[in-house]
């Protein structure tokens, strides 16, 4: 993922997801638009699951959106 440096051909999020899947992980889903990540996770996460959000730039916003989506109107986890 380029963060100011030139892109490396063949190195991108989709390729990473495909590589993880190819090495035996069954539940890999590539989400092209980061704004769709909270919705994609909301239907699959269960109590005590761990979500690790890594990236550069404003990826912290995605982490916040995930938490917001998973809390009920009282601020407690769903």
Image: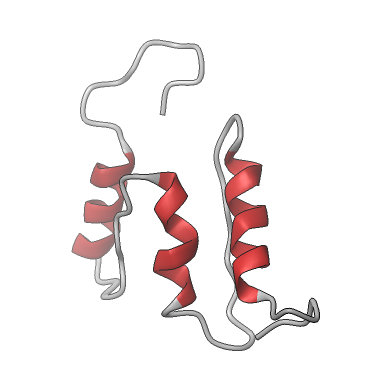
Query: Is residue 22 shown left or right of residue 12?
Result: left
Residue closest to the eye, 24 or 59: 59
Residue 52: x and y in percent read 58, 59
Q: Quadrant of the C terminus?
A: bottom right
Residue closest to the eye, 33 or 14: 33
Quick one: which residue is furthest to the front in this view?
Answer: 73
Residue 28: x and y in percent read 30, 66
Residue 64: x and y in percent read 67, 55
Height in image: 5 above or below 23? above
Q: Quadrant of the N terminus?
A: top left
Height in image: 52 above or below 58? below
Height in image: 36 above or below 6? below
Residue closest to the eye, 9 or 67: 67
Residue 38: x and y in percent read 50, 62
Q: Residue placed at 62% from the left, 74% from the top?
A: 70
Instruction: Please identify the quarter of the rendering in which residue 30 is found.
Output: bottom left
Q: How is the model colour-coded?
A: secondary structure
Instruction: Please identify the quarter of the rendering in which residue 18 is found.
Output: bottom left
Query: Is residue 73 shown left or right of residue 52?
Result: right
Q: Residue placed at 21% from the left, 30% from the top?
A: 10
Numbered disc total: 0
Q: Residue placed at 29% from the left, 32% from the top?
A: 11
């Amino acid at each position: 993922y380029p963060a100011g440096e030139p892109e490396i051909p063949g190195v991108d999020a989709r390729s990473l997801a495909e590589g993880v899947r190819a090495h035996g992980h069954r539940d890999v889903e590539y989400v092209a638009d980061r704004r769709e990540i909270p919705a994609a996770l909301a239907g699959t996460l269960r109590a005590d699951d761990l979500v690790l959000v890594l990236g550069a730039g404003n990826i912290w916003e995605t982490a916040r959106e995930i938490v917001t989506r998973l809390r009920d109107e009282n601020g407690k986890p769903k």
